[in-house]
Image (tube, rainbow, N blue to C red):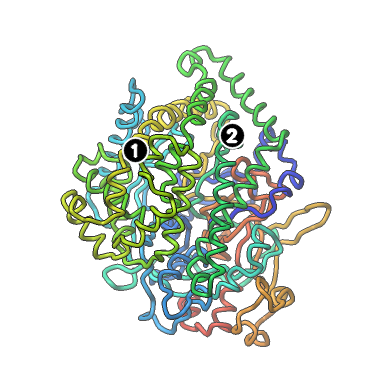
């Protein structure tokens, strides 16, 4: 899932009774649970499986968060990771040169041929600590910018103390329940991550955009990475045992990964703001960007290769946005959320002491949302979405801001430049990664056009950015003359600090220097009028939810490691039973020889050697969301049986609520991976490493 999200927006509202979701009792399989708060008794009641702390610790220690926004699993004692193919597309793009790695696959014969993925970092969770009281105390009695800065300082201190100066670690304070709880997560980080294996795009994304978010599914969406330490494969004695047999119907399964974001605890006013303001803007801009990327791809084969990964992402995101709009326009669903909110308010009203402390955070949130509406487009275009995906603009902003921020104490910096975050920032910024000047120009022109049209051509900030030029002319001038595509130039600017920035002469650096005060002003206004107040109101609402829900309340997803539980199961849709499995035989039966149902030549040649009854993809009831891509699916023993790569049509509702009747996770089986490695790709050495033979 992307990483992946929805396909047919209309079917969401029609296929599921979403109006009943918010009012219904939580299904047994619902929840993306933090590893320090897994409801073991509830799992046992639901699945008949007792999970103990050593089992949980083993799963935590073998689950990986990737800086690309995906998840992975440790699957050998030599640092081997299993993830999804779509999670390594940026790496494949970076490694493509004379050959098109995305189309042809990354098929190598020896470990010495494994290649570094620029900018990619892998993280394994080691420990969790509660720092809520310290964070709350830091901002007590403060408001606006003072409130935000106090929180940032306290968070920086907590992260620094948790890591103790150990460069091998990354520590991150993560907010849960909308700011009602703060925990510091300590990760072991690996900054040397290399590509080991990736199949051809045609088999990894078989069925293409047409089959995305659907089932039956027939994809081999997998890839292998390896983490290195000091130039050698990392020793990982704790790994998930590889299962060669197929998953079984009704089998209990668990998924460990880092789901990105959900909005299940949003208030009605927040959901309405998303529906009426945020999502329509996102839909329009994504549709426009998709059209521009498609036009770019039509030029020739090289342009298609360059744009393959960003086009995959934008088409995927567009489906998500449209699915979310459909869900929030369902009157039944919104009415149910309103009833849920009124129920919480009624529970609060009977506790006079609590009312005195909490007041009416829902009314406060509604007022904050008015500020959200007023400020959103300016904040989006000047700050949050600035550059619209341009790698070089992002590098320029990081260099300019980094020179300024690193001169300050860590607690007074923008959060992304805190000491705990600098190693990952440096890696992303300084790794040698090829970029296309043409594609970069497209992104910058697209963003500047959105800025002019969205904020307004006469708005002072717009005039400050464009400075009398058209978006097209400005984008071309900046990108064609900038030297930031050279990693050595970026390193010199980063290491040289403010003096190097001021003397660089690079037009893109000069552009960011000139406009960044405008972007920072938009950011400060957002923090003062929206971000800080929202966090304060969310904290108070979280207290009421705890009072009502107790241990059954799990936090919204925050791209932090989580565990979900469920079973292998199909579903009934439109009166038809959809089984939980597809096979290699079905893959060949679906192949037409024409994209997106064209099989690579290797697969055509291997057909007679394969066990066509092998389970290829399967569905489970587990509760996941985007960011879970690449998460391991494990059985009750803790052995890996598959890797998550998508959800079905109904899974889009997972952003707002879990609907267990039809919401399904889609995973690739380890049995199919083994069969393909051995008989299609001839990777006997990789099979031996996975199986321990």
Is 680 rendered above or below residue 672?
below
Above or below, comparing residue 251 to residue 235 in the picture: above
Q: Which residue is drawn at 54% across and 67% down?
A: 297
Relative to 157, is 298 above or below? below
Q: In this view, does 517 lie to the left or right of 533?
A: left
- Name the side, left or right, on which 146 lies relative to 289: left
Is residue 64 visible in the rendered image? The answer is no
Q: Left or right of 571: which side holds 488?
A: left
Residue at the (47%, 63%) spot, across then down: 73
Give the camera-side residue of 256 and 156: 156
Circle 2 crowding by C-alpha within 10 Å: few under 14, some 14–19, many from 20? many
Coordinates of residue 158 in the picture (x, y in percent): 29, 40
Q: What element carries label 2?
A: helix
The residue carrying pointer 1 sits among few (fewer than 14), some (14 to 19) or many (20 or more) residues within 10 Å by Cα, namely some
Q: What element carries label 1?
A: helix
Whole-percent x, y for residue 261 in the image: 51, 45
> What residue is shown with label 1?
518
Foreground disc of the pair 2, 1: 1
In the image, 525 versus 125, the foreground residue is 525
Image quadrant for the N terminus?
A: bottom right
The CA distance from mark 2 to mark 1 is 29 Å
- Farthest residue in the front direction? 468
Q: Residue 322 carries which label?
A: none
Residue at point 35%, 40% (across, down): 464
Query: Could you tell whether 79 is left or right of 653 in the image?
Result: left
Residue corresponding to mark 2: 271
């Amino acid at each position: 899932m992307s990483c992946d999200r929805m396909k047919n927006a209309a079917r969401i509202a029609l296929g599921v009774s979403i109006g009943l979701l918010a009012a219904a009792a939580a299904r047994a399989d619902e929840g993306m649970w933090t590893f320090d708060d897994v409801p073991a008794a509830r799992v046992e009641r639901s699945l008949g499986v007792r999970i103990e702390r050593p089992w949980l610790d083993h799963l935590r220690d073998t689950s990986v968060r990737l800086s690309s926004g995906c998840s992975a699993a440790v699957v050998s004692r030599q640092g081997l990771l299993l993830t999804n193919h779509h999670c390594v597309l940026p790496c494949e793009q970076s490694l493509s040169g004379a050959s098109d790695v995305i189309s042809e696959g990354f098929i190598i014969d020896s470990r010495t041929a494994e290649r570094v993925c620029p900018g990619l970092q892998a993280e394994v969770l080691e420990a969790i600590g509660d720092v809520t009281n310290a964070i709350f105390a830091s901002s007590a009695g403060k408001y606006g910018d003072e409130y935000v800065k106090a929180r940032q300082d306290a968070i920086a201190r907590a992260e620094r103390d948790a890591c103790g100066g150990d460069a091998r670690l990354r520590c991150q304070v993560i907010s849960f329940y909308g700011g009602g709880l703060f925990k510091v997560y300590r990760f072991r980080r690996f900054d040397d991550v290399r590509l080991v294996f990736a199949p051809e795009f045609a088999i990894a994304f078989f069925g293409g955009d047409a089959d995305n978010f659907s089932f039956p599914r027939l994809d081999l969406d997998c890839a292998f990475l390896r983490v290195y330490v000091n130039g050698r494969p990392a020793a990982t004695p704790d790994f998930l045992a590889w299962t060669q047999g197929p998953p079984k119907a009704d089998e209990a399964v668990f998924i460990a990964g880092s789901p990105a974001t959900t909005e299940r605890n949003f208030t009605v006013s927040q959901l309405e703001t998303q529906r009426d303001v945020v999502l329509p803007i996102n839909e329009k801009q994504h549709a426009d960007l998709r059209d521009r990327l498609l036009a770019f791809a039509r030029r020739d084969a090289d342009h298609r290769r360059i744009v393959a990964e960003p086009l995959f992402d934008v088409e995927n995101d567009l489906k998500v946005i449209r699915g979310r709009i459909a869900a929030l326009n369902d009157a039944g669903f919104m009415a149910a959320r309103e009833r849920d909110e009124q129920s919480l308010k009624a529970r609060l009203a009977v506790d006079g002491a609590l009312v005195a402390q909490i007041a009416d955070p829902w009314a406060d949130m509604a007022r904050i949302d008015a500020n959200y509406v007023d400020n959103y487009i300016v904040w989006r275009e000047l700050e949050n979405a600035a550059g619209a995906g341009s790698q070089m603009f992002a590098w320029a902003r990081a260099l300019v801001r980094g020179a300024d921020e690193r001169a300050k104490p860590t607690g007074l910096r923008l959060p992304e430049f805190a000491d705990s975050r600098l190693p990952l920032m440096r890696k992303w910024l300084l790794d040698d990664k090829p970029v296309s000047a043409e594609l970069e120009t497209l992104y910058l022109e697209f963003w500047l056009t959105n800025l002019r049209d969205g904020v307004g051509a006469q708005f002072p900030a717009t005039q400050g950015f464009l400075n009398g030029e058209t978006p097209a002319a400005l984008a071309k001038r900046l990108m064609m003359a900038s030297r930031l595509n050279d990693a050595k130039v970026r390193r010199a600017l980063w290491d040289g600090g403010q003096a190097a920035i001021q003397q660089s002469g690079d037009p893109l650096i000069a552009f960011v220097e000139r406009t960044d005060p405008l972007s920072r002003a938009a950011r400060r206004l957002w923090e003062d009028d929206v971000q800080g107040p929202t966090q304060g109101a969310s904290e108070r609402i979280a207290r009421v939810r705890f009072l009502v829900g107790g241990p059954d309340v799990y936090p919204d997803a925050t791209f932090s490691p989580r565990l979900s539980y469920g079973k292998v199961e199909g579903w009934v849709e439109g009166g038809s039973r959809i089984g939980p499995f597809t096979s290699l035989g079905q893959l060949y039966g679906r192949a037409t020889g024409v994209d997106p149902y064209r099989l690579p030549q290797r697969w055509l040649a291997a057909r007679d050697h394969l066990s066509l009854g092998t389970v290829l993809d399967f569905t489970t009831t587990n509760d996941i969301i985007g960011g879970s891509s690449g998460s391991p699916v494990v059985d009750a023993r803790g052995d890996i049986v598959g890797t998550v790569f998508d959800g079905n049509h109904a899974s889009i509702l997972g952003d707002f609520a879990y609907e267990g009747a039809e919401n399904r996770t889609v995973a690739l089986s380890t049995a199919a991976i083994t069969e393909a490695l051995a008989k299609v790709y001839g990777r006997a050495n990789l099979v031996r490493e996975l199986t321990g033979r």
